[in-house]
Image (cartoon, rainbow, N blue to C red):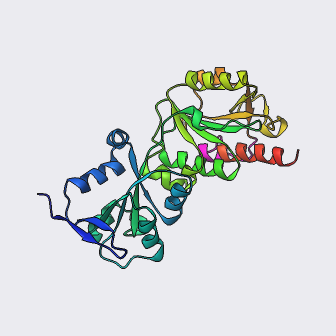
Amino acid sequence: MAGPRRRTRVQEEHVVTRITARNARFQVLQTLLANRTKRHRAGEFIVQGVRPINLAIEHGWDVHTLVYDADRSLSPWARGLLASLPDAEKIAMAAPLLGELSEKSEGVAELLAVVAMRADDLTRIPVPADFLGLVFDRPTQPGNIGSIIRSADALGAHGVVTTGHAADAYDPKAVRASTGSFFAVPTVRAESPLEVMDWVESQRSSGVPIVVVATDEDGEAAISDYDLTGPTLLLIGNETAGLSRAWREAADVTLSIPMAGAASSLNAANAASIVLYEARRQRSTT
């Protein structure tokens, strides 16, 4: 049975909704965390943490709802956030319920944000003359998506694309692993390599000669021996199966990451970081 849901006021006299039991609104918030289909149907996802929330706002993402702990005195940051987003829905939630929505390792969050998704549209990715982008083909682990986005942000990439039957970039594990970089680096899901290559061809026709670079242990050359200073789209394969045949055929060149020791392969996120770093290194020395 749904619990009481009443109107109250917080420090700055914001009118808010108070939730003290697992009512319908609470259950909707739960589905944004756990159910990919319903999350995308709603077009919303939950963000936790000071840095990720701040970056979402800084980069212009639409915040629909702020959910905060009704049982504690809020920090200046949380109070300021509530005041700065007058159009966002405000929910004061009982701490035990908020704890169910919070990252388990972090305890009960002080505040969560419900943020609107952005369109899966490749035109969101800027394509300057020094373009550097990355495709992650059929990723299965949301955490790897987030880690790659974080590296892409740190190493100057302009966008990340996931292709095929992929884990969800809006999954809480992916957003958390990105440590907020998800909001700074355009991240788009494309149905197939064909969709991405059509976009690549349109960029080439517009005067940006993007080179599509695959990575594989049997590459034609080492990444350090190939010129990555021009506009480049890097391809990283599925964690287990590697790149699909379609992507192998679409690549202009296949490069390898030299390895020593007994390891036969690298984690996808580690491989992405190494190739992104090499591209960054070459560009910083030219």
At horizontal 49% and vertical 52% (from top left) the residue drawn is: 175
**Along the horizontal axis of the image, is 21 left or right of 55?**
left
Quadrant of the frame with the C terminus: top right
Quick check: 55 above or below 146? below
Quadrant of the frame with the N terminus: bottom left
Residue lying at the far bottom of the rendered structure: 73
Residue lying at the far right of the rendered structure: 286
Q: Position of residue 65 (x, y in %)?
A: 36, 57
Residue 196's image quarter? Answer: top right
Residue lying at the far left of the rendered structure: 1
At horizontal 51% and vertical 55% (from top left) the residue drawn is: 56
Q: Position of residue 226 (x, y in %)?
A: 82, 34
Q: Is residue 47 magenta?
A: no
Can the viewer see residue 127?
Answer: yes
Q: Is 29 in front, or is 219? A: 29
Q: Is 244 in front, or is 72? A: 72
Q: How many marks?
A: 0
Q: Position of residue 18 (x, y in %)?
A: 24, 66
Quick check: 224 above or below 165? below
Quick check: 127 above or below 198? below
Q: Is 186 in front, or is 236? A: 186
Residue 90's image quarter? Answer: bottom left
Magenta residues (range):
258-271
Q: Is residue 266 magenta?
A: yes
Quick check: 39 above or below 219? below
Can the viewer see residue 103?
Answer: no
Q: Position of residue 75 (x, y in %)?
A: 44, 76
Q: Main secondary structure of the magenta part?
A: loop
At horizontal 64% and vertical 50% (from top left) the residue drawn is: 153
